[in-house]
Image (cartoon, grey):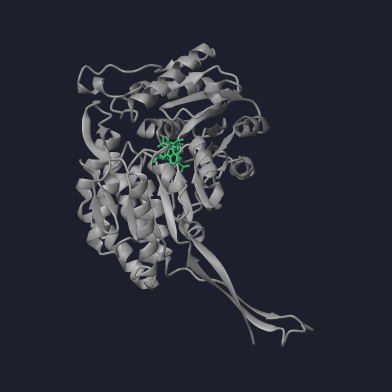
Amino acid sequence: MKAEHYVDGAFVSAGTVFPVIDPVTGAGSGSAPEATREVVDAAVRAGRAALKGAWGSAADGERAAALRAVADGIDARFDEFVDAEVRDTGKPRELAATVDVPRAAGNFRAYADLLYGRGERAFTTAVPGWSGGSGQALNYTVRRPLGVVAVISPWNLPLLLLTWKVAPALAAGNAVVAKPSEETPSTATLLASVINDAGLPAGAFNLVHGHGAGAAGEFLTGHPGVDAIAFTGESATGAAIMRNAADHVTPLSFELGGKNPALVFADADLEAAVEGTARSSFTHSGQICLCTERVYVERPVFDEFVSRLGDRARALKDYGPMISAAHRDKVLSYYRLAREEGATVVAGGGAPVFGDARDGGFHVEPTVLTGLPPTARTVREEIFGPVCHVAPFDTEDEALRLANDSPYGLAATVWTRDLSRAHRVAPRVETGIVWVNCWNLRDLRTPFGGVKASGIGREGGEYSLDFFSEPVNVCIQI
Ligand code: NAD
């Protein structure tokens, strides 16, 4: 697919073109234009103009109708979206067809609905003896959009994570300039086409393609006309964006990296814990921010758990690739590092040979490691591949200490049949999300985000609308 920018209601191909690679085979599958500073500037100015025009004065009901039209437009071109997402990411078709694309449409519908469920508080005030008048007042809050917001998204769930920000940003009345990952530009371009057909006013949604550092991403996040930045990606990139945005004190919402722990207690349903951990470590070949990379298992069931998880990893045959040759090389370098650090490789640990076109692609084996100390880099750094390290623990406190010994704090899973233990442990795990006896079971209304190096702020439901709007208090003396 030939991706294009979408600026001020028109598709534009300005800029040098870079190739898009199919990670399953390593062959070229399309191209995208690299946005210059001028293209980014035109997109920001188009957003500002839209806010002064029809989009800025659209009522809640009109914006909700526009979001529903976008959701319908995604549904109508469902197969096209699935094809494009599979081609760009190499993820199994079933994943794109059951998660990425339906959730993208769902994000627009969810925020159309939420616009109506939302209200603000009002206070009647009495300040006895106030010298300026009656001292009686009515205080109420109105929310206004932030303005032109930049949305920057990664390659692992390209459409889902993009729409997860674009839908609430538009619902709250902002204009958007979005930049998807340079690795996965296709579904964002289809989304622009759907938004165009849905009839949103020109400039309400703009799309620019290109790379991050020293390119479109940096031009956008440092632009003085950008009123807020919503970013999902690596923690180091978040830090770079923060520095770039500091001069303009631009508000930030960050969903960053993770090194997510699973805590498996001896009283757990072991089969469910093994199955759940295999899912949480190997789905999308470990390239979901919520994937488990550290597993802590209570000693009496440790050997049994490791043996069964190793079997699961070896049994996986039809898995997708890493997004790029560079990312494959990074993951394989961690497989080598783990050995150097003294790990036992229970399963995987290399790159597979399929004997077909996939050998040109970027696959790595699902891998299970044991035997490393908590200080090992393999246990501390985000790998973002199909790999987990399993270590034993003896007490609940030790399990929590090990789980919390991390610079990251995105998501955790706890496996236990003891209800009291679940309630005791869950609030003490230092992550923004804790799943008990499940993984990645999501209700879009719930807060989503991380602590420590895993992020700033929360997305989901009203949390996103809170970020994308500013409360203004009005005080009327009565
Ligand atoms: P990345 O940080 O390399 O890139 C993400 C986006 O930022 C891309 O669009 C990229 O072009 C842009 N970018 C890169 N450098 C930039 C800069 N200096 N200024 C502005 N923009 C810049 O991340 P990735 O490799 O695409 O994605 C994988 C990472 O994302 C992992 O760390 C993963 O944990 C994280 N992630 C987090 C969540 C979450 O919800 N917490 C969800 C998905 C992925």
Give the percent coordinates (x, y) of residue 427.
62, 45
Whether residue 36 is situated above or below residue 205 in the rendered picture? above
Q: Nearer the viewer, residue 469 or 201?
A: 201
**Could you say which quadrant of the image residue 316 lies in?**
top left
Number of numbered discs visible in the structure rendering? 0
Query: Does residue 91 appear anywhere in the picture?
Result: no
Quadrant location of the N terminus in the rendered image: top left
Give the percent coordinates (x, y) of residue 253.
51, 50
Give the percent coordinates (x, y) of residue 135.
72, 84
Whether residue 205 is situated above or below residue 326 in the rendered picture? below
- Which residue is pictured at 39% across the width and 69% down the height? 52
Q: Can you tell me which quadrant of the image ligand 1 is in?
A: top left
Q: Nearer the viewer, residue 192 or 140?
A: 192
Q: As drawn, is 76 to the left or to the right of 35? A: left
Q: Nearer the viewer, residue 317 or 116?
A: 116
Query: Does residue 429 appear anywhere in the picture?
Result: yes
- In the displayed orientation, state which residue is furthest to the front: 38
- Which residue is pictured at 61% across the width and 22% down the height? 375
- Which residue is pictured at 56% across the width and 23% down the height? 391
Give the percent coordinates (x, y) of residue 119.
50, 71
Quadrant location of the C terminus in the rendered image: bottom right
